Image (spheres, grey):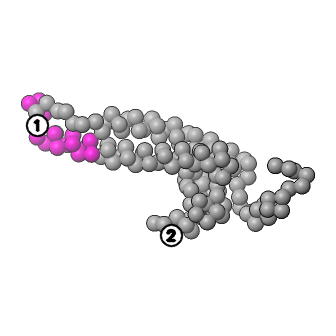
Amino acid sequence: MCWIAPSLQYVSILQMNDSALTNKQLDTLHRLLGQCRDSLKTQLVQFESAAEPVTLDQQSVGRVSRVDAIQQQQMAIANKTQTAQQLHRTECALQRVEDGIYGDCLHCGEPIAFTRLEVQPEASLCLACQSVSE
Ligand SMILES: [Zn+2]
């Protein structure tokens, strides 16, 4: 990056996207993403052990609790899938921070509002594109 004579394109980006993230906001979100990733990883390990196949001794456990155990296992599998997806999105967002493209909508390229990223730091789409895709 040449600070003495910035390219015209760079100047126009600065002028157009006045709601682009400041360095401080980016820093905050970067930290937030790191925390999210760590806690999601911990959760995933817990769900993984809970989602293991039900191996209950038929003699010691009645039919009802066996059904319970299977239901709990299925819930754990659903939670595990959800958590894994969330972790994947979070890791993708961290990658975008590394690549210097974090905070821009992957669909339209407009900056995503900081207020949205604060709540959902792994968001890859702006609100407008997100509502279209849902
Ligand atoms: Zn968009």
**Residue at image x 58%, y 40%?**
34
The total number of labels drawn is 2
User: On screen, 131 above or below 101?
Assistant: below
> Is residue 58 found left or right of 98 in the rendered image?
left
Magenta stretch: give its range: 59-74
Q: Amino acid at mark 1?
A: Gly
- Looking at the image, can residue 113 be seen? no
Residue 26, image x and y in percent?
68, 48
User: On screen, 59 above or below 76?
Assistant: above
Q: Name the residue at the right extreme.
A: 4
Residue 115, image x and y in percent?
62, 57
Q: Nearer the viewer, residue 62 or 3?
A: 3
Q: Amino acid at mark 2?
A: Val
Q: Is the residue marked 1 within 8 Å of ligand 1, measured from its CB? A: no
When asked about the image quadrant of residue 53, the answer is top left
> In terms of secondary structure, what is the magenta stretch mainly?
helix
Q: Which residue is mark 2?
A: 132
> Is residue 119 found left or right of 26 in the rendered image?
left
Q: Nearer the viewer, residue 58 or 102?
A: 102
Residue 65, image x and y in percent?
16, 39
- Looking at the image, can residue 82 be seen? yes
Q: Tell me if mark 2 has few (under 14), some (14-19) or many (20+) residues whose alpha carbon lies within 10 angstroms of its own.
A: few
Q: Secondary structure at mark 2?
A: helix
**Residue at image x 21%, y 42%?**
70
User: Disc 1 vs disc 2: which is toward the camera?
Assistant: 2
Q: Which residue is mark 1?
A: 62
> Is residue 9 found left or right of 30 in the rendered image?
right
